[in-house]
Image (spheres, rainbow, N blue to C red):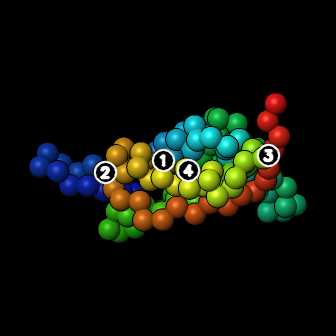
Amino acid sequence: MKGCMSTDLGIITVDQEVIAKYAGTVAVECFGIVGMAAVNMKDGLVHLLKKESLTKGIQVGISDENHITIDFHIIVAYGVSISAVTENLISNVKYRVEEFSGMPVDKINIYIEGVRVID
């Protein structure tokens, strides 16, 4: 589903891929996040995604009322507080995506897929 907003001059349609790319860019800027993860369901392996394919670790849903739900599959840095990292991620992404899109973010689900040691 695409997000649609009506203005005096016409209709604005925002694709889920645009929201996912923006949210992914915001997420990797957050402290303690190494990157997005892709899970291979066939063999259960988790792969760290490069910046070009951030959106594969993010699912965005937009309801009929233009409310956004975002699922993140992330890899965190070793030695950081997971609760602190996720709270920071949620607050940053919620604020910046709402400012960017003009649509409210109802829910952000975070799935920790792995831990990496950062050099």
Q: Residue at x 85, y 55 (%)?
A: 45
Name the residue beneath numbered marker 2: 102
Alpha-carbon span between mark 3 and mark 4: 16 Å
Rendered image: mark on residue 78 = 3
Name the residue beneath numbered marker 4: 89
Verify CB contact (< 8 Å) between mark 1 and mark 4. yes
Residue type at mark 1: give it: Asn
Q: Which is more foreground, mark 2 or mark 1?
A: 1
Mark closest to the chain's N terminus, 3 or 2: 3
Residue type at mark 4: give it: Leu
Percent across and percent down for residue 70 are 52, 59
Q: Which is more foreground, mark 3 or mark 2?
A: 3
Alpha-carbon span between mark 3 and mark 1: 21 Å
Alpha-carbon span between mark 3 and mark 2: 35 Å
Percent across and percent down for residue 54 are 62, 43
Percent across and percent down for residue 84 are 62, 53
